[in-house]
Amino acid sequence: MGKIMGMNGNAAVAYAMKQINPDVVAAYPITPQTDCVERFAEYVSEGLVDTEFVTVESEHSAMSACVGAAAAGGRVMTATSANGLALMWEIVYIAASMRLPIIMMVANRALSGNINIHCDHSDTMGARDAGWIQLFSENAQEAYDNMIQAVKIAEDMNVRLPVMVTQDGFIISHAMERIETLEDDEVKNFIGPYQPRYPLLDIEHPVTYGPLDLFDYYFEHKRSQIEAIENSPKIIEKVGEEFGKLSGRYYGLIEKYKLDDAELAVVALGSTCGTAKDTVDALREKGKKVGLLKIRCFRPFPKEAIIKALAPLKAVAVLDRSVSFGAFGGPVFTEIRSALYDAESKPLIMNFIYGLGGRDIFPADIEQAFLKAEEVAQKGRVEKHIDYLGLRE
Amino acid sequence: MPTLKELVKRPERLTPGHRLCAGCGAPIAVRLILAAADKPVIASNATGCLEVATTIFPYTAWAIPWIHNAFENAAATISGVEAMYRAKKKRGEIQEDIYFIAFGGDGGTYDIGLQSLSGALERGHRFVYVCYNNEAYMNTGIQRSSATPLGAWTTTSPVGKAVPGKTQWRKNLTEIVAAHGIPYVAQAAPSNWRDLTTKAEKAFHTDGPAFINVLASCNRGWRHLPSETIQNMQLAVDCCIWPLYEIENGKYRLTYKPKEKKPVEEWLKTQGRFRHLFSPENRHLIDEFQKYVDQEWEKLLKKCEE
């Protein structure tokens, strides 16, 4: 059993990185991720890790160096936020296409413009189709736990894909929490030694990474990437189970909170799930049959688990902390509504966009979402599919 | 420096069977440079002719570990590879000495990749960066780059009634790189093969970043016969348009001084991309070209204390 420490989300992730002791970290500072990389730089400076720390000149080069380092054959990590992730975008796709198990912490932040340093999910959602596994964290404890699990998931021979671990910028990244850490040895044993596949550094067996791939094979290569990410839910669950045995904290693709007998539910990602749990508790005390579906793994989208969890409900309010301009709802809503299309019984579904650019979400807002869901359930139809929480109108 | 006999016995690292055009300057430069490596080499390659023509899946012409990431990040990519090498060496997981090299065209080096190159040079990774400079974006069909010389016709600096080809001088990238204060910087051409391999060997032996700017003509874009590549390069060197020199730890040295400095016209007239300069209304551009080359040459001679 490790120590109980007071840390913010950035510190918790940096501490996990210290325990993982990756071969190479290449990173560029950006608020609110900066604090994480600074703390890791201190570990490097103090000799507490023997990582090669590459202080690149941009996020584009951060991800580029990560690709080079991972192809060379070792554990590689980075961290970013918002526009930093957007600048990496081109290489984020290449990392997944080369099947490189890079781990990246994303401290979720609004994407410009206008410039805003506070939390929403538009950065990670923008990268949702890049071929990375995406794990969302509810709090700093989960950010720490997810970083360690991410290594094992990414490196699984049936997966070999990069993993993004998110935490809500400032809300988690900068808020001090009580964290239960593992012992260094426990982390080391859990992740095991790295087994490189076709590393560039194997000069006896030269390989070519990133060739010209025209219409005669490109499609098949994409198909194999699809298979890799489709293999991952089983592995994510298996690793979550093993991590639970080690730490007492079990993880799956989704988390159901008081959902089994519920009639109404909200669906959320990240720190809002904590607020939603409190709201559920308060409403339960008032005798309302309400629950929360928390999505931990957004990519791959755990459709079966979600259908199973939501199909019996009367009405569901999906909370999206990002916008998909011109689309029929936010990214989470779109996926959920689509997943439920063929379900034999399905709830009425509506979408609430909230919290853009760091706008706070209060229990009262979530209560309002539940009230709307209740109203819709009584009426038996949805009149307004997309609405907003906490917006001045 | 190994003899020619020794060089030809070294393994072919870029093998025959690649799909680069006949008469392309790039593979000649690459093979000469890689032949100068007396230890194993790992390469990264920017998007461009060299990359696409040598690795059409499922084939590869590279007999060394090789990675292409994107257009603008060959330097950042190889710095990641080199960082992993250092990590593994520090941990005792790898023992052998390995060289690291990045290849980029002038587009991927002078333009879109300049930031990534500058960052990697500043960080001091031990790697060689080679710009095979064919003075335009040839892979996408002959568009001007910041390495394209004044007056050259390209598809984005076309010759018309109002504009006689490219209206700007090329960027002096070799000097920009030198300003980073890295230990070894050189300019070379495959026509002077001994000069090129000597510089490549020095670059591989440099403890830190090294940079070689190699002129590598593209007969498709420059509009000359495929059989004229080497002569064309030699003329660029003899007209002092592409001086051969090196900067070792800040010290400039001219590595080839033409016996007779030829007028730039001799080089310009070998290429269709400059044909319009010879019409009467554009003659002043040839004079401007000559003036610029003379000025640059004089500046270089001073730096080299010639």
Image: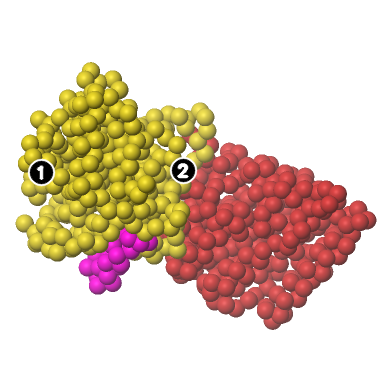
Chain colours: A yellow, B red
Task: Look at the image and give the residue range highlighted in magenta.
Answer: A30-49
Measured along the vertical axis of the image, is residue A373 above or below residue B146? above
Which quadrant holds the N terminus of chain A? Answer: bottom left
Q: Quadrant of residue B96?
A: bottom left
Q: Is residue B237 visible?
A: no
Per the image, label 2 sits on a secondary structure element best described as loop
Badge 1: residue crowd in 10 Å (few <14, some 14–19, many ≥20): some
Of residue B109 and residue A59, the one placed in the foreground of this image is A59
Up/down of B306 relative to A153, above or below? below
Residue A384 shows in the view:
yes
**Residue at the location (55% across, 47% down)?**
B47
Q: Percent position (x, y) of residue B241?
A: 75, 64
Residue type at the position of mark 1: Asp
* Chain letter, disc 1 residue: A
Q: Which residue is mark 2?
A: A210
1 or 2: tag closer to the N-terminus: 2
Please report the residue visible at 84 percent of the width from the left and 61 percent of the height from the top: B285
In the rendering, at what x and y percent does residue A195 appear? 26, 47
